[in-house]
Amino acid sequence: MKFKIIFILFNAIIVFSFLFIFLMPFFILGWDYTQLFWSRNWFLGAIFIAIMVILNSYFAVNWKLFGYLEREDWDGLIDHIEYRVYERKIYRRHEVKILINTYVVKSNTDAILRLESTLREERPKLIPVFALPFGVPHLLKNDPVDMEIYFGELKESPRCRDREWIVWNFAFSLMLQQKSEEAKTHLMAIARAPHNSVLNVLTLYLLDAYAPSDSDVAQTVEKGKANVRSRFSFDRWSQEIEKQKSNLQVLVLARLIDDATGWVYPERQTAPSARS
């Protein structure tokens, strides 16, 4: 119902705005000038009609999708998008993103792997675009070799988004396999040029394991840790984690983020949980 109201209000506002512009010359300067004005600026009306057709066509095409989202009908939403993907071979980025997120809500990692496999065959260019969401089941497998293969392949892709997260996952897989030197090299590269605060803390937390045997790492860790504490109070850090929960990686690594938070703020007994 809310979606329908928004749709009606949107059209009403657009139409009212156009009528206001269309009739304004008449009320101010009279009908003769209005005829002259619109005879010379008829293309404005054509542009308005084109915009209305495009926007309403978008609503019409996505009407079912918006309806499922509004009702939080996840099963219906999955069936709707899966039909478009697997039967009609339509691969729209926003629908792929919604489908992956819905699979996560339903805890269906096998379906994410199936979608990844399908896109590798049908639309391989979309894999780097959704590299991090598609990495969720690989991260949850607890198979570091599989993680190394998946994230190692994508970390060099020029189309890859969230590259720092991809490299971190790759380094994490190396750590799990005791490939310490290679993992340390990648983690240090992230730590020296941090772009994301949560990722930075996770990186420093992993690097701390190498600090006792490497003075350069120890210095980087202590400097980075002090920088985080100077930028974020405990409460502000809690808010920062909350802001980044739209990132599936933050949700998947909630326990590790809690541990890293306790490491940065040891004086606080209760860490701001990424799982709440």
Image (cartoon, rainbow, N blue to C red):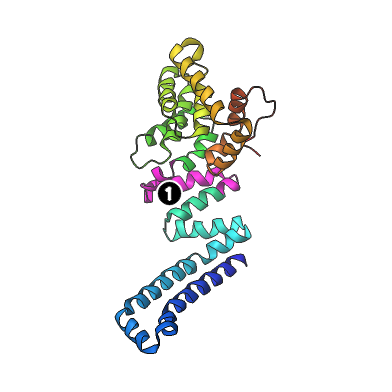
Classify 172 as above or below 108. above
**Residue 126 lies in the magenta stretch:** yes
| Kind of residue sitting beneath label 1 | Thr
* Residue 19: percent from left, percent from top: 46, 79
Q: SS for tag 1?
A: helix
Which residue lies at the image location 40% right of the left edge and 21% below the top edge? 185
Relative depth, front residue between 236 and 112? 236
Check the image and name the residue furthest to the left: 40
Which residue lies at the image location 63% right of the left edge and 60% below the top edge? 71
Q: Is residue 268 left or right of residue 87?
A: right
Classify 162 as above or below 50. above
Relative depth, front residue between 27 and 270? 27
Q: Quadrant of the N terminus?
A: bottom right
* Residue 167: percent from left, percent from top: 42, 31
Classify 261 as above or below 32. above
Q: Is residue 262 left or right of residue 169?
A: right
Instruction: Check disc 1 and report the residue beneath it.
Output: 118
Magenta region: which residues?
A: 103-131
* Residue 125: percent from left, percent from top: 36, 47
Q: Is residue 42 left or right of residue 271?
A: left
